[in-house]
Amino acid sequence: MGWDDARARQALRAMFDAAVGSADPRRMLAAHLPEQPPPGRRVVVVGAGKSAAVMAAALEQAWPDVELAGVVVTRYQHAVPTRRIAVVEAAHPVPDANSERGARLVLDAVRGLGPDDLVIALISGGGSALLALPAPGLTLADKQAVNRALLASGATIHEMNAVRKHLSGIKGGRLAAAAAPARVVTLAISDVPGDDPAVIGSGPTVPDPTTFADARTLVARYGLTLSPQVAARLRQEDDETPKPGQLPNAEFHLIATPDLALHAAAEAARAAGLFPLILGDALEGESREVGTVLAGIARSVRRHGEPLTPPAVLLSGGETTVTIRGGQAGRGGRNTEFLLGLAVALAGAGGVWAIAGDTDGIDGTEDAAGAIAAPDTLARARAQGLDARALLDGHDSYSLFAALGDLVVTGPTLTNVNDVRAILIA
């Protein structure tokens, strides 16, 4: 059976859905829980992230007879019903007043615990914005301004979180420090390249290897304009985040990762009759430039059968970046910008389709997870009077794929293992 447009699109969507399904907390959280505590022990549940509410609901289901208390913070429209654990909804990617209120409730929930008490922290992507407690001397407006500047700077998620942690009263291990001497068990869903615990949600329960000096270096590297109070905060050295070895009460466990999601996508690819090649779960760089590079690999597969023979699929994960340089940016996230960069580089080459999407269902700030690019993407755009290259230069990739009807809309998936990209070469 040959590969036509309908079959290619169906296979790509199956791969993306398999990747998302592999990270559903309702399927795997129970297997990672610690031994159930005996009656009478206090168990406090806290957390933050796009998956925090569904993780809390999964914990309640796994431990129906355990007395649980606590609060988690999730993104608007990501709440699910819970009975014992409170849920606060807040804004992402730029925090709002509920982000600050939720962070204070989380911090208050772990204060005054003893060595026999247990804290379960449920952390997932988005926690950095959703758990926004300004450090002393700062306001929420200060953190919002820095967040916006970081999002437009082209900084990686590791770099953004290094700055965020040093402007926070709860991130970078400060939550675990506040819970001491209670035992803190963190269950996390990774959405960052390399699965670094200190970066996922800005690591509220793990030691922080970065410093104020690192944060200042990053601010200078990206030319960020800071308010006087933020600049003053980053100049001080006497309120550092807990460093490795300073949180003996805390342990950390990953329950879902980008790599596992890519392997699930690879299984779906094999089921569709494709040879999968996983290029890695930690690809970074400018979205459009990554698209150009992967377009070159796709051409090699189609023309020369290298590094694998068609029909094949190239799978990758990680978090690319979009740097806004002057002018007014249009609509789009890193996945649609990647796809438009790929399509422009392929220039209508036959036999190549691609999907790219954020597994949380939201690419940047838009209402789509991502999109699908096809061999005729540029031709159909031209037929509608759309200049693909101009839209790419104006960071307006969403508008092109929306006009073509090629957006991938899932709604909130309630999980997040970063972006999944699949390029099908027939």
Image: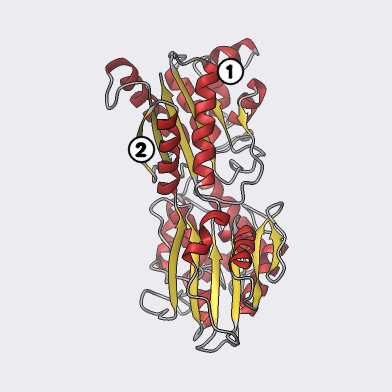
Examine the rendered structure and indicate whether residue 172 appears above or below residue 127: below
**Residue 226 is at least partly visible in this image:** yes
Examine the rendered structure and indicate whether residue 180 appears above or below residue 146: below
Considering the image in quadrants, where does the N terminus appear? top left
Residue at x-position 59% and y-position 38%: 369
Query: Which three-letter amino acid code belongs to the residue tagged 1?
Result: Asp
**2 vs 1, front mark:** 2
Residue at mark 1: 387
Q: In this view, does 248 lie to the left or right of 309?
A: right
User: At which x and y percent is residue 280?
Assistant: 36, 42
Kindly give the residue lying farthest to the front in the view shown: 65
Q: Is residue 410 left or right of residue 344?
A: right
* Between 87 and 270, the one nearer to me in the picture: 270
* Between 106 and 5, the one nearer to me in the picture: 5
Residue at mark 2: 278
Q: Is residue 366 left or right of residue 32?
A: right
Q: Quadrant of residue 272?
A: top left
* Between 141 and 292, the one nearer to me in the picture: 292
